Amino acid sequence: MDIEQIKELLERYQQGQCTSGEVLLIEEWLAGIKNEGLAQLNDDLIDKQLQIIRSRIEGKIQIQPVTVKRNDMGWLKIAASVLIIASCAIGIRALYLKRSLRKELAAQPSTAQHISKGWVYVETGKAARKSIKLPDGSQVTLNASSRLRYPVKFMDHRRPVFLDEGEALFEVAKDKSSPFTVYTNKFVTTALGTAFNIRSYASEHKVSISLIHGKIRVDDLHPALKTNNSKILLPHQQIVLNKISGRVIKSDFKDEIPITSWKDGVLSFQDATMDEVVNSIENRFNVVIQNHSAHTNWSYTGTFKQESLNDVLKIVCMTEGLTYTIDNNKIALN
């Protein structure tokens, strides 16, 4: 309803030509404007005037629902003025909401995918995850801040996939004649039909490969010794490379949750290092964290499902004996 229609409706109300439905419409309209626009703008003056107008309209409906006296023109003029002001306020509010929406969309997690020279390139930003169906029907879930590439079509009984950065959970379609091979800058992992998780972030000091079910072979691309650089993993086994010492350790694990829960947006840590915890929080909430304290030797265990960023930081910092400050999307640990 535009300003001219507002004036026309109020004039007909003043002349006693409104139907009972239109009288109710005026009341509902005033209430709607107050609830939708003004209450959020916190304009005390307009709010006060609307309350006065509403009470007077209610009084007119109860006492004189049709006939309006000429000497009541004052409050009708006030009503018209307030409605015009309210219309402007709603316009400002609508513009504000549009701008907020644009900012919100700009801040949403980003993913990118393109094809070049027969290869598919997939990249995720912070706070983003992406599910990918490969040409053979295998499923890959790519974690935040990760890069993956694979051929548009698998050929010659080979299924090569390159995890150039980040973390991914692979659920491999069975094909005994075509080994499924994932390459990172440290390892080559080969499977026939299985599910396994690889975590290989440049910002972390560890690379881990964990087998959920099936059977895989892991070959070290840069072994300390030239012999015995292949390892066979069975379900619930993993190998972890310490990039600082160069040691590769094979071990068993009982619980899959700390390894695969990221797929469902859950943060789960089991004896995690500082860089693992920090990197996971950064990727989950799209923030940047700097540790200004001397405490860097962490072994953190905990799980967060739907907690806010503040709740996660409070618990982690309390456990590690730290404090934190937030400035926009930058977090300082002290």
Image (cartoon, grey):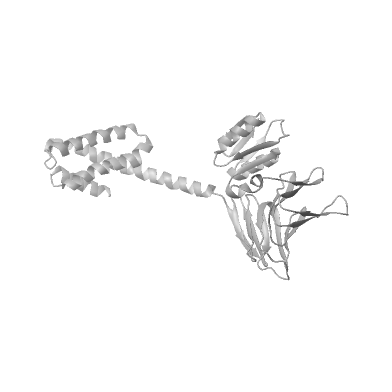
- Looking at the rendered image, the quarter that the C terminus falls into is top right
**x and y percentages locating residue 93 in the rendered image:** 38, 43
Residue 81 in view in this figure? yes
Q: Residue at x 70, y 40 (%)?
A: 275
Depth check: give the residue in front, 139 or 281: 139
Depth check: give the residue in front, 44 or 111: 111
Determine the image quadrant of residue 269: top right
**x and y percentages locating residue 48 in the rendered image:** 29, 32
Determine the image quadrant of residue 32: top left
Answer left or right for 273 relative to 22: right
**x and y percentages locating residue 163 in the rendered image:** 70, 56
Residue 327 in view in this figure? no
**x and y percentages locating residue 53 in the rendered image:** 23, 36
> Up-down: is 45 above or below 88?
above
Q: Residue at x 31, y 32 (%)?
A: 45
Answer left or right for 107 relative to 43: right
Q: Residue at x 71, y 58 (%)?
A: 162
Q: List the single residue furthest toward the bottom.
A: 156
Task: Count the numbered circles shown.
Answer: 0
Q: Residue at x 48, y 49 (%)?
A: 102
